[in-house]
Every structure is written in C-alpha cells, then in structure tokens.
Amino acid sequence: MNSVNLIGRLVRDPELRYTQSQQAVCTFTLAVDKGLSRDKRQEMESAGKPTADFPRIMVFGKMAENTSTYLSKGSQCAVIGRVQTGSYLDRETGKTVYTTDIIADRVEFLDSRNNAQNNAGAMRGQNRSNYTNDGGDFNTGQNTDDFFEDDFQEIEDDGRIPF
C-alpha cells in the first residue's frame, strides 16, 4: 500500500507551472514536524540537526491552481497522496540523482488566518459591504436576534414522535 498523510507548513511560496498539454503542476516543500519528545528535540536542536522533514509535494490540475492561489509561505495544510521515487543523470557531474516526491491527491487548507486573508483577496471586485470579519465570524448585516422568529413554530409533543 502506497499512502501518505502529512500535516505541515509551507517552507516557501508554491510554484505553479503548466505542462505542454496545459495541465497545471504545483510544487511546494512542506515542513513536517518529526513529533519528538521534548528531551530528544532539545538534543537534536543543540546538535544542529533538523527536527522536521521537508518532503517536496507535487499537485496536478485544478487542485494545483487552487494550491498556488490560496497557500503561501507559512500556510498550514494537510496532504493526502502517495510516494513516488525516481532518478535522473546530472548533466554537470554525470552522477545519478535519486528523487523522492509526494504526489498529492488531495490538499486541505488548514490555516484559517491565511484562508481568511486569501478569501478576502479572492472576493476582490465583488460587493463586500455587508460583510465584516470579527475574529473569523462573518456577519451578513442582518439582525440575528430575530432571524428565525417568523419561521419558527413550536410543535406540541403528542407522544407520536419516536425519539
């Protein structure tokens, strides 16, 4: 079984390019914490060793375009995909270089702070005068105190409801 689930933060902004057949390809590097104990983490940090892994992620199609648009350096995301290994011959040294990439089937945007900023950017050109952002909750400008008052009708329990 070749299945990968990762959660981490982007090391740099994602790079979007298109193949000759016009398929979108987005690549980015994800910093994934190794989940070390406090003592082991301090030991590795003092030795100058990394406490995270940095896999390269590749995303294709519409998900690649969305990833490029809505994620940036420092954004937190979850990736579901598979491992793909490969190799190529380095032109300068003549040596074989081995690669390991994560091919993402799905990318979930987890960082609500960045999502709120990006959603605001995506709504440019639209009328946003009725929306305000007070800590993540959106208010449509309507009075919510009596929003359901006209539609709500209390039902008497006559014993026929099975729950």
Image: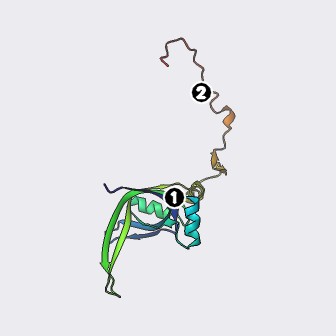
Q: Secondary structure at mark 2?
A: loop
| Dot 1: element | loop
Could one spot residue 41 in this view of the protein? Answer: yes
Query: From the viewer's perspective, is the residue at label 2 or at label 1 nearer?
Result: 1
Farthest residue to the top: give it.
Answer: 158
Q: Which mark is residue 56?
A: none
Task: Indicate whether 97 appears above or below 117.
Answer: below
Between disc 2 and disc 1, whose residue precedes? 1
- Give the side of residue 57 with respect to residue 51, left or right: left
Give the label on residue 35, or none: 1
> Splitting the image into 4 quarters, where does residue 95 fall?
bottom left
Neighbourhood count class around disc 2 (C-alpha, 10 Å): few under 14, some 14–19, many 20 upward: few
Expressed as whole percent of the image width and height from the top left, the position of residue 35 reads 51, 58
Query: Residue at horizontal 48%, vertical 68%?
Result: 14
Looking at the picture, does residue 143 appear above or below residue 45? above
List the residue tagged with mark 2: 151
Q: Is residue 17 left or right of residue 52?
A: left
Residue 56, given in percent of the width and then of the height, sits at 43, 68
Q: Residue at x 60, y 22 (%)?
A: 153
> What's the distance in space between the residues labelled 2 and 1, CA to CA?
50 Å
For the residue pair 119 and 28, the one nearer the viewer reads as 28
Residue 69: x and y, percent?
Answer: 50, 63
